[in-house]
Structures are given as C-alpha cells and as structure tokens.
Amino acid sequence: MRAYGRVMDHRVQGVDHVAFPTFDPAATVRFYRDVLGFPVVHSICAAGWGPEDHPDFIHFFFDIGNGDRIAFFYYFGARPEIGGAAGAKGDVYARFGAEVPEFFVRSRHLAIHVDDEADLLEYRRRLDESAWPVEMQIQHETIESIYTHDPNGYMFEITRAMRPVTPQEDLDANLTIDALLDVVAEPEPTFGKLLARKAELIVAHAAEWEPAR
Amino acid sequence: MTTLYVLDVPENLALPKVAAEDPDVAVGRIGPYFVISAPGPIVIDRRATGCRHAVWYSSVAAVAPDSRIVQHDKDALRVEPA
C-alpha cells in the first residue's frame, strides 16, 4: 500500500490566513465585520517598496474561527483594471468570459465550517438581512451549505457536516486517490477506468483494513 | 459476472438492500465495502433507495474491471458484464 497509513508526522495547524485583493475595502469590512461579525484581528499599513513600483497598501485580517484568518490587500491608487479587463463572470481577481462554464467558475471557493444547523441558520439570518443575502442553501445529504458572493465577487460558503466522517471514508479516499494517480498516468483517463482500477485496489487492500487503528 | 462495490456508510445502506431484492444478486463484504455481484446485470432503482442526487451519483465506490456501468441516471444504476 502506498499511503493508507500515516507515515509522516502531521504537524501543521490549519489555515494561518488566505489572502485576496480588494478594491472596495468599505464593503469588504461591512460584509465580514459588520454583517457576519468576524472580528478584525490584525492589519498592516505599509508604504510601497521594492523594484516593482509597489503601491502603498493595507493588509487586513478577519478571524474565521480557530484563530484562522481571511485577509485582504487594499492597494492605494490601484484600480480593478490592474488585474486585466473586466470579465463577464468571476470576481475582481479571476475574470472569465461568458463562455466559461459555471461549474468551473465556482470550483475555486472558500468554505467556512460551523458545528450545527443552528449556527448555519444564524449566519443565514445575518446575510439575509444584509446587501449580500444567501443565494443558495443546499443539503447535499451529508453536508449542508449556504452560499453567497462577497462584495469582491468571491464565492463564500458556510457549511456543516450532517454526520461525522467515518474511518472507512478515509480508506476510501486514499484508494480513490491512488486509483486516480494510476489512471491519469495513462492516456485518456476516464471515470470508468478509475472505478475499475479502484476495484483492483479494494480487492488488494480493503480486506486487511481495520478501523480505529 | 458483474460486481460493484459500495462503501458502508449510513446514506449508502439502501443500495445493497434494494439490489438484494433481486434473487440473482448476492451481497457480500470486503473490509468496509459491500460487494454486490450477480451472474448477469445488476439494476438498482434510485427511487426505491430513497437517495437524492448527491448520494446517488457518488454511491459507487468501484466497478470490477470485467463489469461496466451502462446506466447511472435519475432512474436507475445498471451494471453489466463488460
């Protein structure tokens, strides 16, 4: 087996911060601090320096729980055009033409975790009273999520698990990834080839698997 | 022979149960997976399982190399000998 048991120490401690540019710091602060109630926990006021004619900027951070943070850069004097022409889809950072499929545009997003339905509905209430109401609330049977877009166009999700993740799902995930690596190493990978390769890996490895090691 | 594998998690339990209603279908286990097998086609009716989209379309863990999925839509999952 390749990686079904944890071989290396796992020392990391979650998200320190994830950072995005903003051209509308006022709306960004309204959305994260005033609507959602995420505290401002850090900010850096920096004069531009370096060889690239770097603008003066504010780098500001909101707490998203567990001490994890979402951060923004506001560059004085920078306009959205700095990132290229406006797109028909996407956000202020990633701009896409009208022809780009929605599943692809939505595939890169941030999802913030809550513990239960009451917490999910509390954030739904806060968003629905704001200028950025919830656009979708979806129960995917094992998780439930609310979605909106923040003032910068970034897709924003809050999600809860409807049951704990089981140990066998970790095994299944590792078998899936090993099967995926095998099929993408060959020409023309398909879902059918992955399911067939995974069957071979299940036969080879699943019987010896024991939960709660 | 037709064989498909379904992970044993709560929302998948209806699949082996519905499949086993066909007397030609056998349901066994390997580790945490149900092994659903039959000499010919295996057909599972989605509505009989009560599964909605997210679970239904992600409920197949694997399909034996000698079998293939010929239908997996809102009505049914059908696996046949390849």
Image: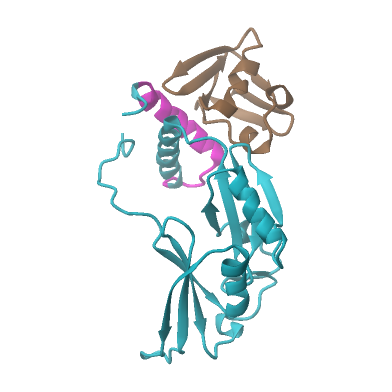
Image: A57 above or below A194: below
Quadrant of the snapshot with the N terminus of chain A? top left
Q: Percent position (x, y) of residue A167? A: 42, 32
Furthest residue toward top = B23
Q: Percent position (x, y) of residue A130? A: 70, 65
Segment colored magenta: A185-207
Q: Which residue is pictured at 42% across the width and 65% down the height?
A: A17
Q: Which chain is brown?
A: B
Say whether residue A202 is magenta.
yes
Residue A47 visible: yes
Quadrant of the snapshot with the C terminus of chain A? top left
Quadrant for residue B81, please give it: top right
Image: A135 above or below A80: above
Q: Which residue is pictured at 69% across the width and 49% down the height?
A: A137
Which shade is chain A?
A: cyan
Image: A55 above or below A17: below
Q: Percent position (x, y) of residue B40? A: 62, 15
Q: Nearer the viewer, residue B68 or B11?
A: B11
Q: Nearer the viewer, residue B70 or B22?
A: B22
Total numbered labels: 0
